[in-house]
Amino acid sequence: MGCIVMKFGGTSVGTTEKILNVAKRILDEKKRGHEVVVVVSAMGKTTDELLSLANEITHEPSKREMDMLLSTGEQITISLLSLAIMQLGGEAISYTGWQAGILTESVHRNARIIDIDRTKVERQLKEGKVVIVAGFQGVDQYGEITTLGRGGSDTTAVALASALSAERCDIYTDVDGIYTSDPRSVKTARKLSEIAYDEMLELAHLGAGVLHPRSVEFAKNYDVPLVVRSSMSAEEGTMIKEEVQMENNLIVRGVAFESDIVRITVTYEVPFNGSLAKIFTTLANHHIDVDIIVQSIMDGITPSVSFSIKKEDFAETIRILNSEKEVLGYTDADFEVGLSKVSIVGSGMVSNPGVAARMFDRLRQEGIPIKMVSTSEIKVSVVVPQSEMLQAANALHDEYGLSPEDAEVSL
Ligand code: ASP
Ligand code: MG
């Protein structure tokens, strides 16, 4: 039997009791005959606590020192878990990112993994040990410790699975799989048995929080089968892979939503003496993440471009637009707050026209105004008032037959 990678998130290793529980699960998997590599996150809210400690000292911390600080969280978990496995009679060894050969680019707080030297990990696996690797961290070519961005342990796990040609990568978390929507807000949401990489990638980017988007990208590029499952129960989770059967001919597989969106509208005179590129380049240089962009040029109406950003970037965006007004060459800038984004995702859209039309029609029937629209091959997103976000999500979940009572009906 081959190697498998098991990853446990912060809540799953939040207490020593939970760590002992995780150790049992690992040893069960080992008894089934697998070689086992384990990746863990920091215990519970440790990373947040470390961040607030730094925040008590400075609001502009050195990124290098933050990586020194944040990487300690995972180191606590690996050693405790290794001790727990030994206590239960197993053999284990823990490694930090650099000990496990995880080489990253030379960027602090958001580094990408470039290469993995698997020599050490493989040697320990051959000796029959469970190898426990600290998630979310690596080392750059100068020997500096780097971290991979919040939630980055998922990416460590998938990258190791790919480097070791593992059979699969199991992500153990506090939910039991990927749902058609967030069950806390959409009561009829249900667990999916499988989902395609591309759909999961869209959902992860749309804020479906369960997986680090980069880990899904990695899994897709290197064809690593991923399973998301609960660390508390033995229930089967959701398998994420390349080819997936659409259940009951459903076109949409999930509904995602995200609050705190702001729409900015910039108007200008014709001929436009600035340029659109200049506006977006300037914002990009300040690391402002612009999402949907809509430009309208029509006879008799002042030309404008609208774009959406996250609320956390609002103050900075306004500051940049104001201070660079001359250079950017626009006449007026306006904004609308209190918005949200609701999206439908499904690879079935590629071959089924009219999916967006149906979405707009349902929202019209619900009396929900659409402020902006954006589409990809397998996604349609709309910006709607935040006060109507959950109504929209529930209505669309129903519209595309995702609720259990509809699941038998073929569309
Ligand atoms: N501990 C890190 C975080 O909280 C990494 C992770 O959990 O994946 O973001
Ligand atoms: Mg996570």
Image (tube, rainbow, N blue to C red):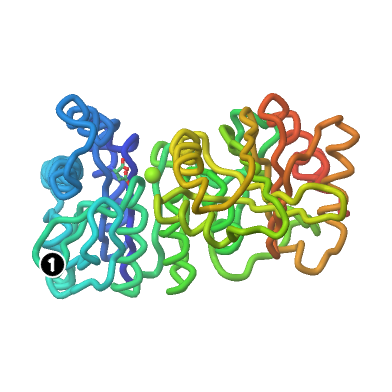
Question: Which residue is depicted at the point 59% across and 61% down?
Answer: 275
Question: Residue 98 placed where, x, y %?
Answer: 13, 61
Question: Which residue is depicted at the point 31% across and 46% down?
Answer: 25
Q: Residues within 10 Å of mark 1 (few under 14, many from 20)?
A: some
Query: In terms of secondary structure, where does tag 1 sit?
Result: helix
Quarter of the figure that contains the N terminus: bottom left
Question: Which residue is depicted at the point 80% across and 39% down?
Answer: 398
Instruction: Residue 257: name its quadrant.
Output: top right
Question: Residue 237 placed where, x, y %?
Answer: 51, 49
Q: Which residue is mark 1?
A: 124
> Would residue 3 be visible to someone looking at this image?
yes
Q: Quadrant of ligand 2?
A: top left
Question: Which residue is depicted at the point 79% across and 35% down?
Answer: 395
Question: Residue 382 placed where, x, y %?
Answer: 72, 45
Q: Pick whichever, 122 or 198, lies toward us.
A: 198
Quarter of the figure that contains the C terminus: bottom right
Q: Is residue 149 left or right of residue 257?
A: left
Amino acid found under the numbered disc labelled 1: Gln
